[in-house]
Amino acid sequence: MISKSEKIDNTDKVILGNGNDCIYSSDCNITGINNNVLVVGGSGSGKTVSITEPFLLESKNRNIITSVTKRRIVDKYTPLLKERGYNVLDLNFVNPTKGNISYDPLAFINSEQDLQFVAKTIVCSNSKCENIQDPYWYMSATSLFIALISYVFMKVDNPNFSDVLDMVDTLDIWECTDANSKCVHLATSHDSYFDKIGEENPKSLAYVNWLSFKRLPIRTAGCVLSFLKTSTTAVFTPELKEMFKMKHKIDFNKFLKEKTALFITNSPVNPSINTFYKYVLCTYF
């Protein structure tokens, strides 16, 4: 609890009820406890007005990440936080162009493990994954997605995630018969891209995963591609695709060094969009 000797006006506080006994400093060095607060309540029970808004009102120095579905919170508290010297970032996944910052997963991929995590997270956002007992389909779709993301990293200058989605959208497959052997094999619109990578680096992540897809029977490959396209279509609205092309992108290293408030707007009705919100938190924490 905050002592009377503290300069209350300059202290970041956590208000958990009515009365001085329910007002606490958020400085762990003072309280000796962590700042985790579990709030449980149904829709309309007052979670925002009783917890979120008092937290924002009592924020003077701490950096803030606030997830919202109600834009009223962003509009109401942005002017106040700016007056207090905050750099206010508005990351809007519902209407990205109405925010002032964008987010691109490619900017935070620093290893093959990161790349695989991004691909799996997006593919598994497909609600069909919850009802599929055989993991083969989403694992195969993830492998194909890894190949396409890897290709963009290897061959596109200054890539953003819209380049990856273009690769997905323009990927077509058909059955082709070899003129000499008369063998039937899978042909795709991207064969020339990956054939070149195979010549340059046959052990690359892009080529190895591409071969896994190319060796599938035509019907199986069609199902895998359909699964991938369904997942990306569900997550990436036209607005999100435009966000990847925005100039100003979030820099979490800068976030740690400056007094910053980050609002993240997600959708209360589209859980697939919230995949991005979850990934942002994974990136940061």
Image (cartoon, helix red, strand yellow):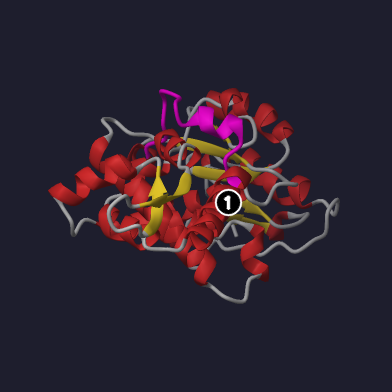
- Relative to 273, is 221 above or below? below
Secondary-structure class at tag 1:
helix
Can residue 223 be seen here? Answer: yes
Which percent across, then down, holds residue 195?
24, 46
Q: Classify the position of the C terminus by image quarter.
A: bottom left
Is 121 positioned to the left or the right of 149 in the image? right
Which percent across, then down, holds residue 206?
28, 53
* Residue 243, magenta (yes or no): yes
Which percent across, then down, holds residue 270?
70, 47
Q: Classify the position of the N terminus by image quarter.
A: bottom right
Residue drawn where x is 48% and y is 40% of the image: 61
Is 237 positioned to the left or the right of 261 in the image? right
Res. 127 image quadrant = bottom right
Is 95 positioned to the left or the right of 191 in the image? right
- Relative to 65, is 128 above or below? below
Is 186 in front, or is 88?
186
Q: Which residue is mark 1?
A: 231
- Relative to 78, is 103 above or below? below
Is 133 in front, or is 158?
133
